[in-house]
Image (cartoon, rainbow, N blue to C red):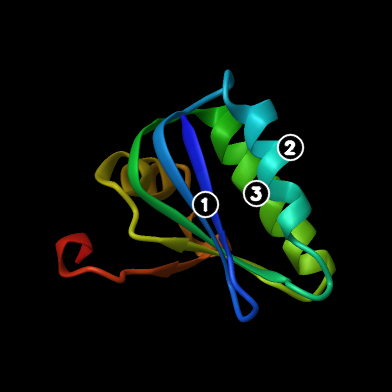
């Protein structure tokens, strides 16, 4: 999986590309979790190009959301790919997150 970050003064965005699974969880945690701070407590995670997620990836997203909420923030999931959308619906985890659609293709 490729992890690309955009760190701007007003917002932080993480773009994920590829498979997000147990093999990628450690790298995700190392790169993404430190981005949530009291000063920058809202993190946008772009999932438009994620082809697969497993239970470990879901647990990382939930863990990240808990960390953000601990500093009065949140994780916003952006442009869910179909595989991500389906698994969030099946597991009933979608309500834990704010979900945004920025492109007409994602609607």
Residue 100 placed where, x, y %? 39, 70
Secondary structure beneath label 3: helix
Secondary structure beneath label 1: loop
Q: Nearer the viewer, residue 74 or 29?
A: 29
Q: Which mark is residue 42?
A: none
Relative to 60, residue 52 above or below:
above
Q: Which residue in the structure is indicated by mark 1?
A: 93
Q: Which residue in the structure is indicated by mark 3?
A: 62
Classify the position of the C terminus by image quarter. bottom left
Q: Decide if residue 102 is on the left or right side of residue 22.
A: left
Q: Nearer the viewer, residue 29 or 74?
A: 29
Residue 44 placed where, x, y %? 53, 64
Q: Which residue in the structure is indicated by mark 2?
A: 30
Q: Are marks 2 and 3 in contact (CB under 8 Å)?
A: no
Residue at 63%, 37% in the rendered image: 28
Residue 25 placed where, x, y %? 63, 29
Q: 10 Å neighbourhood of mark 2: few (<14), some, or many (≥20)?
A: few
Please tell me which of labels 2 and 3 falls first in the chain: 2
Secondary structure beneath label 2: helix
Relative to 82, residue 22 above or below:
above
Residue at 39%, 38% in the rendered image: 17
Residue 47 placed where, x, y %? 40, 49
Q: Decide if residue 31 is on the left or right side of residue 83.
A: right
Q: Are marks 1 and 3 in contact (CB under 8 Å)?
A: yes
Residue at 78%, 76% in the rendered image: 72
- Quadrant position of residue 106: bottom left
Distance from label 2 to label 3 (Cα)?
A: 15 Å
Please tell me which of labels 1 and 3 falls first in the chain: 3
Please tell me which of labels 1 and 2 falls first in the chain: 2
């Amino acid at each position: 999986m490729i992890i690309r970050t955009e760190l701007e003064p007003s917002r932080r965005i993480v773009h994920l590309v590829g498979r997000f699974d147990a093999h990628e969880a450690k790298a995700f945690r190392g790169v993404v979790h430190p981005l949530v701070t009291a000063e920058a407590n809202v993190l946008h995670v772009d999932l438009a190009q994620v082809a697969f997620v497993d239970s470990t990836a879901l647990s990382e997203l939930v863990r990240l959301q808990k960390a953000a909420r601990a500093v009065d923030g949140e994780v916003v999931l952006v442009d869910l790919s179909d595989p991500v959308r389906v698994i969030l619906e099946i597991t009933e985890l979608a309500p834990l997150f704010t979900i945004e659609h920025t492109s007409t293709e994602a609607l």
